[in-house]
Structure formats: C-alpha cells, structure tokens
Amino acid sequence: MPAFRVTTPARAYDAVIERGILGRAGEFVPQNAGAVFVVTTEDVWNLHGARLRASLEAPNVLLFPGGETRKRLAQVEALADQMALAGADRTSIVIGFGGGIVTDLAGFLASIFMRGVPILQIPTTLLAQVDAAVGGKTGANLASAKNLIGTFHQPMAVLIDPDVIATLSDREYRAGLQEIVKCGVIQDPDLFAAFETGRERVLNRDPALLDELIAGAVRIKADVVSRDEKESDLRRILNFGHTIGHALEAETSYSRFLHGEAVAFGMVAATRLAVTSAGLDAHDARRIITTVRNYGPIPPVDDIVPARLFNRLSSDKKTLHGNVHFVLPEQIGAVRIVTGIPEQAVLDAIDWTIASYSTARAMA
C-alpha cells in the first residue's frame, strides 16, 4: 500500500494508493464527524457507489451533472443549498467522488461552506488520481478561462483505487496518461522511459505497471506540493502543457477536448517552443513529442486559429503583470519557467503543433 505524505502549512495528509481501498473509505472518516456529503455524478455513483455507500454510515449523495461547461459557481451554490437544507454544519464532511471536475468543484464547495469544512478526495479517473485530487487546488470556471475562481483547501486524505480505472473508456484513460507523461518530462526520466518502452503494456492497462506509473506521478505531485503549496515558485512546473492547453479548452468552449487531450496539445506546443526559444535539444524534443503523440489521438484541431489561442493566454491565471509564463523542458526530467518570449515565436509553435496534428490525422 504505497502512501505519499503531503505536508503543507495548512495540513499534512496521505495520498494512499491501494486496490480495493474504495471499500474501506469509511475508515478515513473521523468517528466524531457529522453528516457526510458525497459529491459525485450519476454515472460514477451507478458504477461505484454501492461499494462506497457500504463503507459509510448513511451518506447524503449530491449529484452534480458533470462536464467542464457546468463547472461554474451556479452549481456550487446549488450543491451548497442542498447541504444546508439537509442540515449540514461545521462538523460535516464532503467527499469528492469522481473525476477532476468533481474533485475540483467538491473541494471548492468544502472550502467555502460555512467558511470551510473537511474534504476527503476519492478520485475515479486516472487524471484525477495522479493530478487533480492531490494538492488542494479547487476551482470553478469562468466563460473566458478555466479555474479562475478557486481556493487552496487541502483534503484529509486522498484515496486512490486503481481498480476503478477498469471502467474508464479508452479515451478517458489515454487522457489521464498524459498527466503522467508530464510528470516524467518535468522531473523523472525513468518514469518517462516507461512510457517509451512499455506502450503496449500501458495501453493494455497492465496492473503492475499501471500501479507503478500512478505511484510515480503521485510521488512527484506530493513532493512538489509539500515544498510549494500555493504555487509561488516550484509548483508552477506542474503546469507543463497547461498554459496553451487551458487556452485550447476555453477557445473550444470546454466542449471538444478532455483536459488531458488539451494538455497533450499544450505539451507538444511547449516542447516546440523550447526548441526554438529555450535551447532544447532536438533529439529530446522528438522523444517528448513522439511519446505524447503515441498516447493520443486528440480531437481535430484544424480549425484552431493561432492568434485567437494566443489571445486567450492573457487570461490564464499563470500570467503575471501581463507576462505569460511558460514551463519549457531543458531536457527530459528538467524544466524551467520562461517569460518574455516574443509573440511570433509562440504563434509559430502553436501553428506548428496544429499542422503536426493535422498531418498525422490525414495519414491515419
């Protein structure tokens, strides 16, 4: 049972990886806790709710309709109203039970309800297990950009059950893999190499290898968050691929791409930008781009206009004093934060990435 300790000024807790831990979730709820409120979606509850319910004492189930387009303040208010009407108080506990959208929104709800109640995160998608549920980031979207409203609210624990991944579609699974590839690029060459050499095993969801990949990503996330809880410096490296990826999601109204697919596009664009503007070796760039692409495909990008995507970057929460900050690889296993890159270089990298994905689709 690998467990990785996250230690922050706000709270210390474990991210526990164990097959079957969903059935033991009740053990992580304090005995003196009040009512338990499970924020989830109908599909997740239908698939996995019976096992969670069996481990809890009369939980209140709050159904969220799901989807990035519904990750808005109106949904948070609706969920908070349901809690209030059910008699929730400061002893109540929220459980985020679903993918990254659910864990983000449930965390935000817990952070502001009665000025803060505890949350237990139980992610059910690969992407949420290795990224969204760990680290205490919460948020809701605006129409103009993703996660511009949010808080840092560390959970009591994160319970990661790799068994639930068996119910994911291939598309959801591949999208989650991209967040682990990201971890390899930013800090762990061995983790990255596992994707290069083990593609068939990874795509076939080999249990032993998958557990290792999840553990590798969670270890990195836990270490980075412990050293920089609120993204003042080091934690920004976790945004490799996200600056342009978030812009792509917003530009397509959060309706075309899964988050991991947008991050894949963003990683390819950032890697191309690193070659032209930050001195990344062409060989390492090819390795990164090939590996990202090997765990695709992504939806069509032929209609994306580089200038419109570039204009979205100014709304990204990582833009400071009008300067867009990019996380660019120096080599596999190391990245740095770069600002002041000329607009044309960014536009060229976006244009190159669009063309490369369009060419690949035409050849498929």
Image: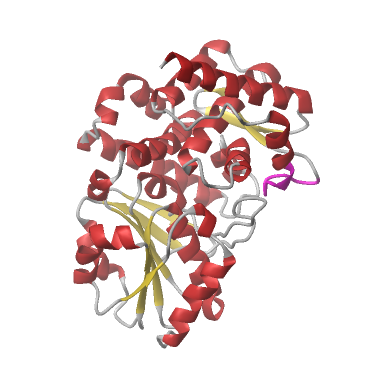
Task: Report the side of 262 relative to 176 (left or right).
Answer: right
| Residue plotted at (19% across, 55% down) | 20
- Kindly indicate the quadrant of the structure image that contains residue 204: top left
Residue 17 position within the rendered picture, expressed as x and y whole percent measured from the top left: 29, 50
Q: Toward the viewer: 12 or 205?
A: 205
Overall secondary structure of the magenta section? loop
Q: Is residue 347 left or right of residue 78?
A: right
| 208 left or right of 220 in image | left
Give the residue displayed 50% in from the left and 27% down from the top. Answer: 333
Total labels: the figure holds 0
* Magenta region includes residue 315: yes
Q: Is residue 164 visible?
A: yes
Q: Is residue 95 above or below residue 272?
A: below
- Pinpoint residue 179: horizontal percent, then vertical percent: 45, 38
The C terminus - image quarter? top left
Q: Considering only vertical position in the picture, is 170 above or below 292?
A: below
Residue shown at 61% from the left, 28% from the top: 270
- Identify whether 324 is placed above or below 349: below
Q: Position of residue 53 (x, y in %)?
A: 23, 70
Q: Is residue 329 left or right of residue 220?
A: right
Residue 172 in percent (x, y) is at 37, 41
**Residue 298 or residue 120, whichever sits in front:** 298
Furthest-top residue in this view: 283
- Magenta residues span 314-321
